Structures are given as C-alpha cells and as structure tokens.
C-alpha cells in the first residue's frame, strides 16, 4: 500500500512534498537503544570493585546510569516531537 503524502507545513516552500513519516527524525529514535540495552549488558559491570562510598560498582554504576538515560530520553523526545 503506498504511503499517503503529508500535508505541507506552513513553513514549506510551495511545490515541496514529503512522504508521510519522513523528515529525518526516525534516526534519533535509535538512541533509545542505549537506555534499553546498556542496563541489560550486566556482564560488563558485574563486579564489586571499584567501590564508591562502600557500594559495589554494580550498584553505583546502575544508579549513575539513571540521569544519563533520562537525558538521552529527553533529547530523543525533543528532537522527534512534531513541531507545532
């Protein structure tokens, strides 16, 4: 089934047509693989050393990942949300 054409944005120049779903925003979604896959790769960080404030590396690394993964998610959201 052929894709329907997207109605042009007011900022588009006359005569430009883009297929539905285009715009180059899809590749930013691949960044979401980082928050999905990194915590699943536990053999990379399954160790006790180095410790930070008595916490084994396994725990403090996972806690340190939370802000990083939130930033990645927010960046992808901002770059892919439709412009209004």
Image (tube, helix red, strand yellow):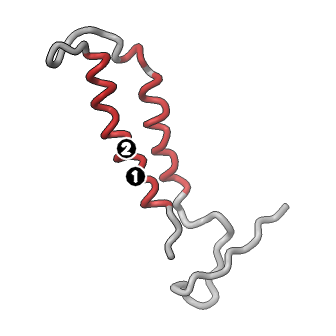
Residue, far top: 48
Residue depicted at 38% across the width and 46% down the height: 72
Q: Secondary structure at mark 2?
A: helix
Left or right: residue 24 versus residue 8 is left
Residue 84 percent coordinates (x, y): 51, 76
Residue 37 percent coordinates (x, y): 48, 30
Residue 74's label in the rendered image is 1
Q: Quadrant of residue 44?
A: top left
Q: Note whether 42 is above or below 25 in the view shown.
A: above
Residue, far bottom: 14
Residue 24 percent coordinates (x, y): 53, 62
Q: Secondary structure at mark 1?
A: helix
Q: How many marks?
A: 2
Q: Quadrant of the N terminus?
A: bottom right
Q: Quadrant of residue 38?
A: top left
Residue 29's label in the rendered image is none
Left or right: residue 74 versus residue 51 is right
Residue, far left: 53
Left or right: residue 40 versus residue 19 is left
Residue depicted at 64% across the width and 63% down the height: 21
Residue depicted at 49% across the width and 34% down the height: 36
Q: Quadrant of residue 58?
A: top left
Residue depicted at 55% across the width and 84% down the height: 12
Q: CA distance from mark 1 to mark 2?
A: 6 Å
Residue 30 percent coordinates (x, y): 51, 45
**Circles 1, 2 touching at the beta carbon (< 8 Å):** yes
Q: Which residue is the site of mark 2?
A: 70
Q: Nearer the viewer, residue 4 or 67?
A: 67
Number of residues whose C-alpha sits closer than 10 Å to that of mark 1, classed few (under 14), some (14–19) or many (20 or more): few
Q: Nearer the viewer, residue 53 or 76?
A: 53
């Amino acid at each position: 089934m052929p894709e329907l054409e997207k109605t042009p944005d007011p900022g588009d120049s006359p005569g430009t047509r883009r297929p539905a779903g285009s715009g180059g925003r899809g590749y930013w979604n691949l960044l979401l693989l980082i928050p999905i896959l990194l915590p699943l790769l536990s053999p990379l960080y399954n160790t006790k050393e180095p410790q930070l404030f008595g916490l084994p590396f396994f725990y403090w690394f996972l806690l340190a990942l939370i802000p990083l993964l939130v930033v990645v998610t927010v960046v992808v959201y901002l770059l892919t949300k439709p412009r209004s």
